[in-house]
Image: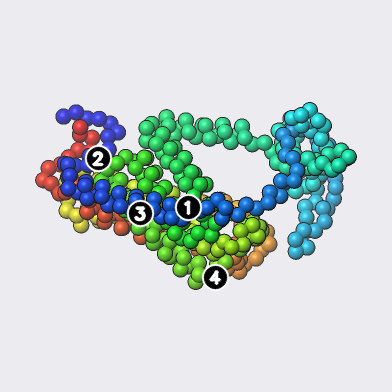
Amino acid sequence: MTHHHGIEPPEGPPRPRLAWSLTAAVLAVTLAALAAVALLWPDQNDVPKGADPYGAVDIVDATVTKVTPFDCGSTGTGPDNIPMVEGMCAQVTAETSDGESASFTLDPTRYVGGGMSAGDEIRISAFTADGQEPAYEFYDYQRGPQLAIIALAFAVLVTVVGRWRGLFALIGIGITLLVLLRFVLPALLADQPPIAVAVAGSTVIMLAVLYLAHGVSIRTTSALFGTLFGIAFTALVGAASTDWAHLTGVGSEDDHLLLATAPQMSLSGVVAASMVIAGLGVLNDVTVTQASAVWEMRSLKPTADRPELFVSAMRIGRDHIASSVYTLVFAYAGTAMTTLLLISAYQRPLLEVAVTEGIAQEVVRTLVGAIGLVLAVPITTAIAVWLAPPKSGTRVSAVEA
């Protein structure tokens, strides 16, 4: 008997009839998803293209050569007569990539904590009028090299630690971005049915990601079926909850800009669609874990019957549910930290703030995703138990070749 470290639980004895049946089912799902994508694929002429607010000016790269801070007092009032920031401004001189000298002023909202210094790589807007010298304004920092280095470090670590599986996971990320950028977002802008777009796009993504990252097997297929249940359930409950809670999708300045750019688009439908897509990562995580847990337990206790196997796997599932729910809440708290800080600073009652459009969207999105996640665990476990290797009278080691 030869032992190998890191070998996953075996699939069990060959079951050609089951394998062919599952192959046919997965093929049917794949064809249906691809047909839906083809049907919903937007005509480029139907995708609205908003005017770039900086389209009338040139955006140029520059390097800061001098920063001169000065006290500029209050900058006046902003929306709703809220006082703007008081503090230090800065007169900045920079050299453009063409060798030109550019000067502009940073107000306290951009010169926070003296955050700009000589040598910083920035981007500036150049406004040119006939017969006049160009006027410059700060546009943003150059972050391309930093983002590229962080992305490269991530890719290298995932590949080194995860090996082939990590490499295939990176390919899955690429496919995910491709589906989102080339299909889901343009289709939503073109006013295709948001829920149908989200379900079709999510199904295609999960088909690619699951089999690329976890291999083609009955175990992966059981995780896929559990994930598809979660997608379908979240879509139905998300659509119903969005209508029931009167979520219009217009809760921020960006939402108003989007509505002005694509007035025919249903932003409430986009909210429901976002509930489907937002929960894909955690949903995929729990379904794969549950399927793997069932196969591991079957290999450790081949004499266990299906009810016993289900109960044992659900003990793991309950722990995973708890940690995954925390993940959803912490993820929102992290991304909405600025909003939460403003709420705290304004000292408004939590319940009063929670029912506003912007916060209520995130609350409903998190809760609907969590409900779909919780129900996907027992469903996936039941599917995995049914499809796992059958009960036998001998113990099969998880590391036996």
The residue lying at 39 percent from left, 61 percent from top is 233
Q: Label for residue 41?
A: 1
Kindly report which numbered mark, 1 or 2, lies closer to the viewer in this rendering: 1
In what element is the residue under mark 2?
Answer: loop
Residue 191 against residue 60 in the figure, above or below: below
Residue type, label 4 = His
Does the residue at mark 3 contact the one at mark 2 (Cβ under 8 Å)? Answer: no
Q: Which residue is mark 2?
A: 9
Does the residue at mark 4 contact the one at mark 1 (Cβ under 8 Å)? Answer: no
Specify whether 120 is left or right of 239. Answer: right
Q: Earlier in the sequence, mark 3 or mark 2?
A: 2
Q: Which residue is mark 4?
A: 246
Q: Label for residue 32?
A: 3
The residue lying at 57 percent from left, 61 percent from top is 265
Image quarter where the C terminus lies is top left
In what element is the residue under mark 1?
Answer: loop
Q: Earlier in the sequence, mark 1 or mark 2?
A: 2
